[in-house]
Amino acid sequence: MSPERFARISQLLDKRQADLTLCLESVHKNHNLAALVRTADAVGIHEVHAIWYEQALRIKRGAAVGSEKWVKVHHHNGLDPAINQLRAEGKQILVTNLSQHAVDFRTIDYTKPTAIIMGQERRGVTPEAIAAADHEIIIPMVGMAESLNVSVAAAVILYEAQRQREAAGCYQQSTVSAAERERVLFEGGHP
Amino acid sequence: MSPERFARISQLLDKRQADLTLCLESVHKNHNLAALVRTADAVGIHEVHAIWYEQALRIKRGAAVGSEKWVKVHHHNGLDPAINQLRAEGKQILVTNLSQHAVDFRTIDYTKPTAIIMGQERRGVTPEAIAAADHEIIIPMVGMAESLNVSVAAAVILYEAQRQREAAGCYQQSTVSAAERERVLFEGGHP
Ligand SMILES: C[S@@+](CC[C@H](N)C(=O)[O-])C[C@H]1O[C@@H](n2cnc3c(N)ncnc32)[C@H](O)[C@@H]1O
Ligand SMILES: C[S@@+](CC[C@H](N)C(=O)[O-])C[C@H]1O[C@@H](n2cnc3c(N)ncnc32)[C@H](O)[C@@H]1O
């Protein structure tokens, strides 16, 4: 690995926010997945979660997501294993939902360890995901469209998290473990 | 038209921000255009501009953009007619560009009449668009990806504009003309 590349990856790791993540519930369109992982990378997310209720979809999508080399994707066969892992990591769980019970996404404190559940393009999130979450959040809309594209919605929320974390100095301090840092530096040197 | 539908469209028009717009320079992927127009609608944009240097692309895309019924799209054959119209409307012109000269997008006052130029998926904006603009703006990124998806980038900027305009009370007051209001109410009643 060239010294420039080593420095570039080190720099990246210095800003990684291991305590911020997305959890995608059956989001299966490749262009949405690609945009989601790319935005996650841009705000310093280190890993995201993907839940697949139908194995066929999971297999179909396979590779092709681009920034996946720099944002680890954990695949889960159901909601429970994903929620259990996020809870074990001490994260608050937010679920995006177009409901009367949802609070404006900007009222949330994203400097806390946080996971944000995003729903399927057509059906949105499951009732089980809503039940498992601490808060339902919504992005205000004033037009005729009833919802935003899923990768757009995630980006709007993640850049609010980025704003809060930047102001709080979170990017001065990586939350990636030393072992994980070594793994990425090692693998990043072998394209 | 049912009284409910009339009320819904009136309500929409009450919040429309005629002095905020996007200008898309050769953005041609349908899923991006659809997401862009949907987000524009959601923050109350009344019309957007699309510049087509290659007529073939313009014709190819045709319909299928969804929220286009509620967000008028002005098509232009080149940059100049678009810029001239935006200047005649008294708008500041911002261009999104991944350059050293760009300022953080959050430093801009979006309560002013504003047009935001978004660039083509692969090549970004043209040098002519950069030259025509008042400011270059950039969304900060801390990962390995070099850019965001174009509809994601537009959404992040538009929701910063929405935040500022909400705080400034802009949504209490529509900037759509009486004639335009009538046109939309009339056409909206005929799906
Ligand atoms: C196209 S929407 C799903 C629409 C579905 N009909 C529903 O009612 O949930 C896909 C996903 O994008 C996210 N989303 C879209 N618009 C949103 C908004 N205004 N606020 C929060 N999340 C939103 C949510 O994660 C949602 O599950
Ligand atoms: C995929 S990018 C174009 C990348 C192109 N290689 C370049 O250097 O501009 C497509 C468009 O998305 C917008 N965009 C993407 N990332 C952005 C960022 N970080 N800040 C501002 N605009 C961005 C710009 O409008 C850009 O022209």
Image: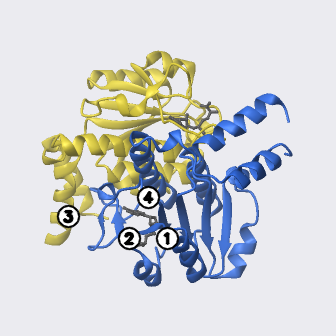
Chain colours: A blue, B yellow
Quarter of the displayed picture in which ligand 1 can be seen? bottom left
Q: For mark 2, what is the residue?
A: A97
- Taking the spot 69% from the left edge, 38% from the top edge, the residue there is A10
Dot 1: chain letter: A
SS of the residue under disc 2: loop
Q: For mark 4, what is the residue?
A: B66
Same chain check for tags 4 and 3: yes
Same chain check for tags 1 and 3: no
Q: For the residues marked 1 and 2, what is the alpha-carbon distance in whole angstroms?
A: 8 Å
Same chain check for tags 4 and 2: no
- Taking the spot 84% from the left edge, 45% from the top edge, the residue there is A191
User: Front-most of B128 and A162?
Assistant: A162
Specify few, some or many for label 3: CA neighbours under 10 Å numbering under 14, 14-19, or 20 or more: some
Q: For the residues marked 1 and 3, what is the alpha-carbon distance in whole angstroms?
A: 26 Å
The amino acid at mark 2 is: Asn
SS of the residue under disc 4: loop
User: Front-most of A180 and B20?
Assistant: A180
* Residue B186 vertical placement versus B163 (above, below): below
Dot 2: chain letter: A
The amino acid at mark 3 is: Arg
Of the two numbered discs 3 and 2 in the rendering, the one whose residue sits closer to the viewer: 2
* Residue A129 vertical placement versus A163 (above, below): below
Give the mark nearer the N terminus: 4 vs 3: 3
The residue sitting at the front extreme is A178
Q: In the image, is B189 to the left or to the right of B100?
A: left
Q: For mark 3, what is the residue?
A: B8
Same chain check for tags 4 and 1: no
Q: For mark 1, what is the residue?
A: A119
Of the two numbered discs 4 and 2 in the rendering, the one whose residue sits closer to the viewer: 2
The reply to whether the C-beta atoms of the residues labelled 4 and 1 are less than 8 Å apart is no
Give the mark nearer the N terminus: 1 vs 2: 2
